[in-house]
Amino acid sequence: MAVKIKFIFSGDNVNKKHSSLREAIEANRSYMEREENRAIEFLKRFREKNLLVSFSGGKDSLVSLHLSMRAGLKFKTVFLNTGLEFDETIEYVKRISDHYSLDLDIIDAGDAFFKHLEHFGPPGRDYRWCCKVCKLGPTTRYIKSLGNEKIYMIIGQRAYESRSRALSGNIWENEWVPNQIGISAIQKWNSLMVWLYIFRHDLEYNKWYDRGLWRIGCFMCPSQDLADLEIVSKFPVYDKWRSFIDEYSKKNNLGEKWVRYALWRWNKIPDYLKKKYNVNDKVRESLKLYIKDEGDKLKIVPNKNIDMNRLKNMMHILPRAALNEDLEVHRNFIDKAMQVIYQSEECVGCGICTGRCNYNALYINEGRVWVDENKCIRCTKCLGPCPAYVFR
């Protein structure tokens, strides 16, 4: 069922009064004080935990950071540089950290996005490989470097941002990031409350908001609407992305409208947009695995040749009888065997699986994960969510 406005009627503006920002702050003072105190008391519950505060340079993480300081918590601040951040955001994060004398660690994804862009193709709202490779992978490796204890990450997450965030609650675990527990003190805050807090406490915010963006993150995030992309496209940071999209469109015969209306923002374009602009989905040729039932055994059949020398190494993850070199698979291990093959062939070295191994049996070499056969106990705990498997 869809709900939408069907008719719009003309009429008089009932409330013609224009309030100033200071009047708005004063009118909401008692409510904001109550919510701020509630958030601070919530954060104090975690004062004995290993705490990190994620500071992205956006308004929500700014408020979470400030609340954490007011709560008197001891924490390290982390900024994840995905390689897609605005230069002004990086400068802003460093400036705020210096201003408050914060202990800042910068997690750097390097060129992971553009390095794997040809492999995955453009990211989409329904195809968020970028978040896993450029955010969760580097975060997993960073947390693993801190040891095996649980890390509590204070994050500027709000329920109003998305359905999945609303369902997660204010304390959650992320299956992609082992040993991290996310907590949000502003889970039930709306955007107005966040801005009232910022102006009430006279906090410096990211200048990109004044340029018209309503959210700050990766400069070409597929979650943005056309208006946001139009703003960003006027700055040099967008040039490299524009060149890639133009070339990708020509290479795959996607057409001028696919570029003009930023339809790369979907892996599967909504039907109404396909019909409106007469465009097709982007096509990605990739490894496909099929199961062949040969009566007394099952066999995995790939659509192209695979690197058997590498697969022999990756097969050490599985119990010995699960998969052999002829790709014959035990019925109880079909899914895990298929994931191992996908990881063997399509691994992009994000490192997410390494964070699940308690025996340090997985390591990254030349951009791919490998198994230390002397350390692996074949427990298969590393076979959780993986970009190579999920986005196949």
Image: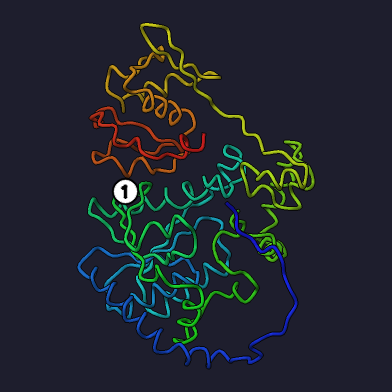
Q: How is the image coloured?
A: rainbow
Task: Work out which residue is located at the far right of the displayed protein and give it.
Answer: 256
Query: Could you tell me which residue is drawn at 45 percent across and 87 percent down?
Result: 28
**Amino acid type indicated by mark 1:** Pro
Q: Residues within 10 Å of mark 1 (few under 14, many from 20)?
A: many
Taking the image as shown, residue 384 lies to the left or right of residue 46, namely right
Return the residue nearer the eye: 361 or 66.
Answer: 66
Location of residue 173 with respect to 253 vertically, above or below: below
Position in image of residue 364 (x %, y %) = 39, 39
Q: Which residue is disc 1 drawn over?
A: 178
Location of residue 295 with respect to 103 vertically, above or below: above
Taking the image as shown, residue 149 lies to the left or right of residue 229, namely left
Return the residue nearer the eye: 261 or 153.
Answer: 261
In the figure, residue 311 lies in which quadrant? Answer: top left
Task: Work out which residue is located at the far left of the displayed protein and give it.
Answer: 48
Query: Could you tell me which residue is drawn at 52 percent across and 71 percent down?
Result: 91
Taking the image as shown, residue 173 lies to the left or right of residue 138, namely left
Location of residue 31 with respect to 360 vertically, above or below: below
Position in image of residue 151 (x %, y %) = 28, 58
- The local secondary structure at tag 1 comes to loop
Query: Could you tell me which residue is drawn at 47 percent across and 72 percent down?
Result: 190
In the figure, residue 319 lies in which quadrant? Answer: top left
Query: Could you tell me which residue is drawn at 56 percent across and 67 percent down?
Result: 215
Return the residue nearer the eye: 239 or 13.
Answer: 13
Position in image of residue 174 (x %, y %) = 36, 51
Number of marks present in the image shown: 1
Position in image of residue 164 (x %, y %) = 44, 55
Return the residue nearer the eye: 33 or 271.
Answer: 271
